[in-house]
Image (cartoon, rainbow, N blue to C red):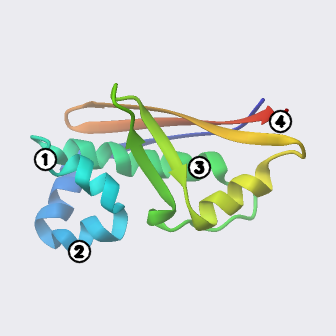
Amino acid sequence: MIIGIGTDLCDIRRIENSIEKFGDRFKTKIFTKRERDYCEPKSGNAAYYAKRFAAKEAVAKALAGARTGSLSWQDVEVLNDPSGRPSVVLHRGALKRLNARLPEGHSGEIHLSLTDDWPYAQAFAILEARKSD
């Protein structure tokens, strides 16, 4: 069953400007080492960073409840499998929030879709609760 949906639209130029202005300080505050390792070698890597930024926002919205606060940027990690399909790994506060949202006897899965079309990057996240065996 679907227990959360989130979406976000990010202006790639905004991420480019932040990278130009703050450099590694911005990148290390927002993105995990594995995310930076994935994005850095890419040509036009601001679009890759922007998609991850949008994904973190979309996942936070999918995990949010009526009284939840903000999450650390580092608590939501966006990775890609060898085929390029994006996935989410939750850490610390985000993982606790997921577990609090799940009905008893269920496990959680986050489905993530990313896209970009200059100058925008978009992410869509669906939080699914699956009955545990």
* Disc nearest the viewer among 1 and 2: 1
| Picture residue at 61% right of the left edge, 60% below the top | 94
Q: Is residue 17 left or right of residue 72?
A: left
Residue at the image position 70 percent from the left and 64 percent from the top: 68
Give the residue type at disc 2: Arg
Is residue 20 shown left or right of residue 51?
A: left
Q: Which residue is mark 4?
A: 132
Find numbered disc 2 in the image and state the secondary structure of the residue it sits on: helix
Give neighbour class at mark 3: few <14, some 14-19, many 20+ (Cα, 10 Å).
many
Q: Name the N-terminal-most of marks 1 and 4.
A: 1
* Label whose residue precedes the other's in the sequence (4 or 2): 2
The percent position of residue 132, horizontal first and vertical second, equals: 83, 36
Task: Name the quarter where the C terminus is drawn.
Answer: top right
Marks 3/1 in contact by CB < 8 Å: the verdict is no
Which quarter of the rendering shows the N terminus?
A: top right
Give x and y (percent) for residue 44: 11, 42
Coordinates of residue 19 in the picture (x, y in percent): 17, 62
Which residue lies at the image location 62% right of the left edge and 45% below the top edge? 62
Mark nearest the camera among 3 and 1 is 1
Which residue matches tag 1?
41
Whichever of labels 1 and 2 marks the residue nearer the N terminus, that label is 2
- Residue 85 against residue 41 in the figure, above or below: above
On the image, which quarter does residue 119 sit in? top left
Report, in whole angstroms, how far the alpha carbon at label 1 lies from the one at label 4.
Answer: 39 Å
Location of mark 2 (residue): 25
* Residue that badge 3 annotates: 61
Mark 3 or mark 1: name the one nearer the start of the chain: 1
For the residues bearing labels 1 and 2, Cβ distance under 8 angstroms:
no
Q: Earlier in the sequence, mark 4 or mark 3?
A: 3
**Which structural element holds mark 1?**
loop
